[in-house]
Image (cartoon, helix red, strand yellow):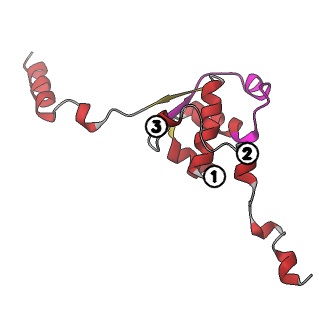
Amino acid sequence: MTEDAEGWFDDAAGPVVRPYAMTRGRTRSAAEGKLDLIAVVVADRVDRRSVVDQTLSPEHIDIVELSRDNPLSVAELAAELDLPVGVVRVLIGDLLHAELVRVSRPVPPAELPDERILREVINGLRAL
């Protein structure tokens, strides 16, 4: 075996199978429709011991810890954990199923009130 062939198995090769192993081979979760890139993940206030007691992976626990104090989007969690978005979606789906996190979606711009109406309301309140 040459030195180049041995180099493939060293730490510099990076995670080759790790994402597949983290999701146990799953590429989708039951909550797939809720988990677009801008969906906001909020961890429920739970004791760290109760999270660990559920035999979750370290990545699951990291997601709960990161989103406990500061709600983060799916994209932000993936960047923070340095994991592919698909893997993070599956992990969040597991946490949703375990009821350890909640996911909310931002209001689409089409459903937001018109700026003109909001200005009229503010002017009306000022007139009071």
Q: Is residue 96 magenta?
A: no
Which residue range is magenta in the image? 40-59
SS of the residue at dot 2? Answer: helix
| Disc 2 target residue | 22
Q: Are marks 2 and 3 in contact (CB under 8 Å)?
A: no
Q: Are marks 2 and 1 in contact (CB under 8 Å)?
A: yes
SS of the residue at dot 1? Answer: loop
Residue flagged by tag 3: what amino acid is it?
Ala
Q: Residue at x 63, y 54 (%)?
A: 82
Task: Give the Cα distance between marks 1 and 3.
Answer: 17 Å
| Disc 3 target residue | 39
Q: Which mark is residue 110?
A: none
* Mark 1 residue crowding within 10 angstroms, few (<14) / some (14–19) / many (20+): some
**x then y, percent, for residue 29:** 60, 36
Which mark is first along the chain, 3 or 1?
3
Task: Give the Cα distance between marks 2 and 1.
Answer: 10 Å
Dividing the picture into quadrants, the one containing residue 13 is bottom right
**Which of the pair 83/126 is nearer the observer?**
83
**Residue 100 visible to the viewer:** no
| Disc 1 target residue | 83
Height in image: 97 above or below 58? above
Q: Quadrant of the C terminus?
A: top left
Which mark is first along the chain, 3 or 2?
2
Task: Give the Cα distance between marks 2 and 3.
Answer: 21 Å
Residue flagged by tag 2: what amino acid is it?
Met
